[in-house]
Image (cartoon, rainbow, N blue to C red):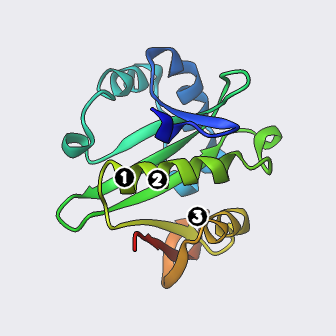
Amino acid sequence: MKTLKGNTVYLRALEPTDLDFLYQLENNEEIWEVSNTTSPFSRFVLKQYLENSHKDIYEAKQLRLVICVSENDKAIGCIDLFDFEPKHKRIGVGILIASEENKNKGYASEALILLSNYVFKYLELHQIYAGITEDNTASIKLFEKENFIKTGVKKDWISSMGIFKNELQYQLINE
């Protein structure tokens, strides 16, 4: 699908061979804050998740795609669609580049553009939204660069290590 292929990255569906990659991602405590995770995932649970990842977005209300580097097919992160609301034509998005060595190379930006094009063209949605803690300057910069507009603040929305953080709301509306 050309819509999910860019110059440096492409997005693909989850494969059974992604088990170890997902196990590393989901059990990385450094990202638990943004994924609302509070405990580790077992390989068994993740294997079941992979077995059910074929479900249609209209049934599952979510979709996870793997971000891969075009030149070597290496999986470097994930981009998730969640809280799909077909009636209101909106969906949430979250993105993660797994390692520091792959950050600040434009991969997340290109993945977000590819995903936005997919959402607007194939799902025919009106908007994509993201919630970002106000201390996550890298994500704020990414979403603002890709024309997401800050539309609000949820005060003390995220509890992390005993501290409450504000969550900024960003939207990209398909005009």
Q: Which mark is residue 117?
A: 2
Residue 26 rendering spot, x and y as whole percentages: 54, 37
Examine the rendered structure and indicate whether residue 119 appears above or below residue 29.
below
Residue 109 rendering spot, x and y as whole percentages: 66, 54
Name the N-terminal-most of marks 2 and 3: 2
Determine whether, in the image, residue 21 is placed left or right of residue 87: right
Name the one closer to the observer, 153 or 64.
64
Examine the rendered structure and indicate whether residue 166 appears above or below residue 30.
below
Residue 43 rendering spot, x and y as whole percentages: 47, 21
- Does dot 2 land on a helix, a strand or a loop? helix
Q: Which residue corresponds to the image point at 74% horizontal and 39% vertical from the top-left? A: 99
Examine the rendered structure and indicate whether residue 51 appears above or below residue 151.
above
Marks 1 and 2 close (CB-CB < 8 Å)? yes
Please, what is the three-letter code of the amino acid marked with disc 2? Asn
Name the quadrant containing residue 142. bottom right
Name the one closer to the observer, 36 or 88.
88
Examine the rendered structure and indicate whether residue 52 appears above or below residue 122.
above
Q: Residue furthest top?
A: 17
- Does dot 1 land on a helix, a strand or a loop? helix
Q: CA distance from mark 1 to mark 3?
A: 36 Å
Determine whether, in the image, residue 105 is placed left or right of residue 147: right
Alpha-carbon neighbours of circle 2 within 10 Å: few (<14), some, or many (≥20)?
Answer: some
Please, what is the three-letter code of the amino acid marked with disc 1? Lys
Q: Which mark is residue 160?
A: 3
Name the one closer to the observer, 155 or 64.
64
Q: Which mark is residue 121?
A: 1
Q: CA distance from mark 2 to mark 3?
A: 33 Å
Observer-side mark, 2 or 3, equals 2
